[in-house]
Image (spheres, grey):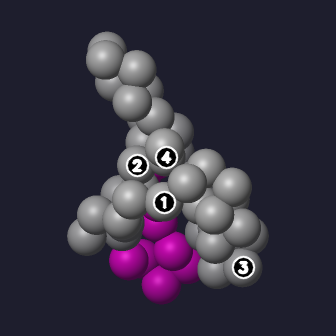
Amino acid sequence: MSLTLSLTDSLRELAILDLSMIPVFSPDGIQAAFVRSRKGESYFFTLG
């Protein structure tokens, strides 16, 4: 599942959903995060 959100919206959602986040930085400068919920569901966020 891929979601594109602004950085502030992403941080707000993560705080609400209480998810763990692993930041990912690609060579072209795009910031992204691999997120896993407490239920084990995984998401991939791109942070614009």
Report the span colored magenta: 33-41
Which of the marked residues, 4 or 1, is nearer the chain's N terminus? Answer: 1
Picture residue at 55% right of the left edge, 78% below the top: 38
Q: What x and y, as percent, mark residue 33?
A: 46, 47
Q: Is residue 40 magenta?
A: yes
Looking at this view, name the residue that lies furthest to the left. 1
Element type at mark 3: helix
Q: Quadrant of residue 32?
A: top left
Give the residue pinned by disc 3.
16
Q: Are marks 1 and 3 in contact (CB under 8 Å)?
A: no
Q: Residue at x 48, y 60 (%)?
A: 5
The foreground one among 46 and 21 is: 46
Q: Amino acid at mark 1?
A: Leu
Label 2 – label 3 distance at C-alpha? 18 Å
Disc number placed over residue 47 in the picture, else none:
4
Kind of residue indicated by mark 3: Ile
Where residue 20 sits: x, y (%)? Answer: 59, 60
- Count of residue discs: 4
Q: Position of residue 9 (x, y in %)?
A: 63, 63
On screen, residue 1 versus residue 7, left or right, reads left
Q: Residues within 10 Å of mark 4 (few under 14, many from 20)?
A: some
Residue displayed at 25% across by 70% down: 1
In three-dimensional space, the C-alpha distance between marks 3 and 4, rounded to whole angstroms, equals 17 Å
Tell me the CA gap for discs 1 and 2: 7 Å
Mark 4 or mark 3, which is nearer the start of the sequence? 3
Q: Which residue has dot 2 on it?
A: 46
Residue 6 is at least partly visible in this image: yes
Instruction: Specify the amino acid type for callout 4.
Output: Leu
